[in-house]
Image: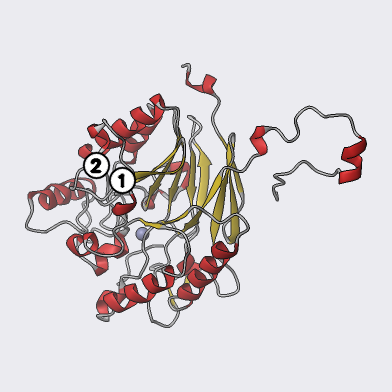
């Protein structure tokens, strides 16, 4: 079974041709520094490729285009390669191949096909791990695979507390000065990808069972907290402590931070059954710092967006797998001194994400 349930922006001032500008008096700042494009990055989620006929999601409500997802990826890569100001990197938000591959002993072949396609991309890609990665591969396999992009991490000199542990797959990097990206491991605490003979597995299973009395642990039926299902996971305290240290450094260094995770953490932006188990703990860490601008996640397939009360923009990117052949599902985020602008393609809507005002933190 397959357990995955599932305004046009103007960056230039309008009007004025060259002659008008020649005649005009100097105007106060329409071309202020806030309109200067600093850099951009690509986002894509839930490719879930498999060499299979089209199918449906678990509820039978959404069509899944298993083969066409490869063509969608190729289209996205061609687009990014041709953009006038190419993205500095692409964030792949997890579930790169479908769990069905394991059933057909096609996991390695499908991954190779997808990774060969990604090789055409002229910029680095950062890979996040989702539930479908663990349906196909062990954590050890992933660690030694091309899906481990931790080699792209940046180190902060003289701050050993900002070095992630090997116990989870997470790292941070700086694609542009003063902008730090943090990739989180949302399956750090999970029964997926954890060695069943380990104490950590027993601990995770205990947490899951305490919150989910269903015999079928993938079922959210009757749950007060529907995110406690087997296809989700959470963040260990160790990883959250590390995140806290990185955000502390970013605050002091006056950086803007983008966080990337397969699982979303903000209920207003996501179906509650898709959230990370301990999304509240992650929010508490993020909300205790001022540096975080946005949080990108996949997993929901439907997409979603909400700005939380602390001014953090939560964006769930629409999944490639449930995108019809005549549409698209990816985006490019253009970063400015005062905002990030998501230019979505196909099912992914455009979004303007202004940075929070400093005064919001004087509470
Ligand atoms: Zn997922």
Quarter containing ligand 1? bottom left
Q: Which quadrant of the view contains residue 337?
A: top right
Badge 2 density bin: few <14, some 14–19, many ≥20, Cα 10 Å: many
Closest to the observer, 189 or 352: 352
- Residue 213 can be seen in this image: yes
**Residue pictured at 59% horizontal, 34% vertical:** 338
Q: Position of residue 26 (x, y in %)?
A: 84, 29
Answer left or right for 216 relative to 311: left
- Residue 61 can be seen in this image: no
What is the residue that sits farthest to the top in this orientation? 362
Q: Position of residue 135 (x, y in %)?
A: 26, 67
Q: Position of residue 2 (x, y in %)?
A: 32, 70
Badge 1 density bin: few <14, some 14–19, many ≥20, Cα 10 Å: many
Mark 2 or mark 1: which comes first in sequence? 2
**Circles 2 and 1: CB distance less than 8 Å?**
yes
Point out the image quarter for the N terminus.
bottom left
Closest to the observer, 335 or 319: 335
Instruction: Give me the disc on residue 171.
Output: 1
**Residue pictured at 28% horizontal, 75% vertical:** 107
Q: In whole angstroms, how far apart are the C-alphas of marks 2 and 1?
A: 6 Å
Query: Label 2 belongs to which residue?
Result: 164
Q: Position of residue 260 (x, y in %)?
A: 40, 47
Answer left or right for 173 relative to 302: left
Q: Count of labels shown? A: 2
Closest to the observer, 93 or 83: 83
């Amino acid at each position: 079974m397959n357990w995955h349930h599932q305004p046009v922006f103007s960056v230039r001032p309008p009007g004025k041709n060259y002659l008008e500008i020649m005649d005009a008096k100097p105007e106060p700042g329409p071309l202020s520094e806030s309109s200067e494009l600093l850099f951009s990055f690509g986002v894509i989620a839930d490719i879930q490729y498999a060499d299979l006929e089209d199918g449906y999601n678990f509820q039978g409500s959404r069509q899944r285009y298993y083969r066409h997802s490869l063509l969608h990826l190729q289209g996205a890569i061609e687009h990014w390669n041709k953009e006038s100001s190419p993205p500095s990197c692409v964030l792949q938000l997890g579930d790169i191949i479908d769990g069905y591959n394991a059933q057909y002993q096609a996991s390695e072949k499908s991954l190779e096909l997808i990774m060969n396609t990604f090789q055409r991309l002229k910029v680095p890609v950062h890979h996040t791990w989702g539930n479908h990665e663990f349906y196909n591969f062990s954590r050890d396999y992933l660690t030694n695979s091309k899906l481990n992009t931790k080699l792209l991490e940046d180190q902060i000199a003289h701050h050993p507390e900002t070095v992630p542990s090997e116990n989870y797959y997470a790292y941070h990097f700086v694609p542009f000065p003063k902008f730090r990206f943090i990739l989180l491991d949302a399956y750090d605490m999970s029964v997926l990808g954890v060695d069943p003979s380990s104490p950590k597995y027993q601990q995770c299973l205990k947490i899951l069972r305490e919150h989910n009395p269903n015999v079928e642990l993938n079922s959210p039926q009757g749950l007060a907290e529907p995110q406690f299902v087997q296809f989700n996971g959470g963040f260990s305290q160790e990883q959250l402590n590390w995140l806290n240290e990185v955000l502390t450094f970013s605050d002091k260094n006056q950086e803007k931070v983008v966080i990337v995770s397969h699982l979303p953490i903000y209920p207003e932006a996501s179906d509650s059954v898709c959230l990370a188990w301990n999304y509240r703990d992650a929010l508490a860490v993020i909300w205790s710092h001022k540096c975080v601008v946005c949080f990108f996640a996949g997993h929901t397939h439907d997409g979603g967006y909400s700005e939380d009360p602390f001014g953090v923009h939560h964006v769930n990117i629409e999944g490639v797998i449930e995108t019809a052949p005549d549409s698209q599902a990816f985006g490019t985020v253009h970063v400015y001194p005062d905002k990030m602008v998501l230019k979505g393609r196909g099912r992914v809507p455009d979004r303007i994400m202004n940075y929070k005002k400093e005064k919001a933190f004087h509470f």
